[in-house]
Amino acid sequence: MEKTEVEEIEIDLLLEALFRRYGYDFRRYAKASITRRIRHLLEKSGHRRISEMIPELLYDKSFLEKIVYDFSITVTEMFRDPGFYRAIREKVVPYLKTYPFIKIWHAGCATGEEVYSIAIVLKEEGLYDRATIFATDFNDPALTKGKEGIYSLENIKQYTLNYQDAGGTCSFSKYYHAQYDSVIMDQSLKKNITFANHNLVTDSTFSEMHLILCRNVLIYFNKTLQDRVLRLFHDSLIHGGFLCLGTKESFQFSDVPGDYERIDNKEKIYQKKTI
């Protein structure tokens, strides 16, 4: 048997142990992505083989926390892909303004930078006070960071450029204050945001959402899991609601019914058709 075939068995056993012992299900993640993450974890752990990590996983909960942190995707930034936020402002906000209240679900929010970005757009468009934003992820340390809203000062120059490219109407410095080597997001932005643990692999729908954002998360799932998550979003959206995916993600090859209209093809913004 080839070495890679043995490794594949070890990976399957590790993921099965993770699911059966703790309920975290990574078995339907894209194979290449999860293999890369497990190899990285192996290097850090000091073990020689993947299978040697299984007993530690089964009996040491602190090792579980390291695995969950390593497996989650925390790459994000303020106004990531500025053209997306410009499209939200120009093509989605006019619809949102017609609703008396607005419910938004930001799935896979990681450390929250993009949650604050959408909050700023809503504030500048006069919609924040009637909005409720649910920001979810399965990574608790990432959620804690998002809830605190404290980020490195060294990134603020790039965030300011992103904000300006996204069509920001104020000075970005209005939304944070600097302290030592960090920036702390303004408290007024946190008022209507709820950070909560939610696992797209195993948990259920949110109800009556007007806007769902889940960008650059589906690319890490296999087709079966992508279908499950797209169905979850479909069932959570009101008719006329909007779904935003990452630039490399789409409904193509999905089993989800094709009852969406493309609002912005480049930025992957879709609107669920009205009845």
Image: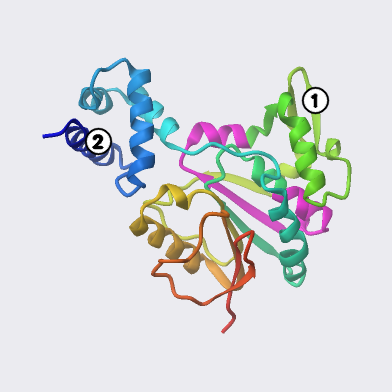
The residue segment tinted magenta is: 118-146
Q: Residue at x 36, y 58 (%)?
A: 223
Question: Which residue in the protein does label 2 denote?
Answer: 11
Element marked by disc 1: strand
Disc 2, SS: helix
Q: Quadrant of the N terminus?
A: top left
Place of residue 24 in the rendered image (x, y in percent of width and height, measured from the top left): 34, 41
Number of on-image labels: 2
Q: Nearer the viewer, residue 189 or 84?
A: 84
Seen in the picture, residue 109 relative to 67 is either above or below; the reply is below
Q: Which mark is residue 178?
A: 1
Q: Residue 234 location in percent, x, y? A: 49, 68
Asked if residue 124 is among those painted magenta in the image, a careful observer would answer: yes
> Which residue type carries mark 2?
Ile
- Residue at (65% x, 46% y) in the render: 115
What is the image's colouring?
A: rainbow
Residue sitting at 76 percent across and 60 percent down?
89
Q: Is residue 62 left or right of residue 6?
A: right
The answer to which of 153 and 140 lies nearer the viewer is: 153
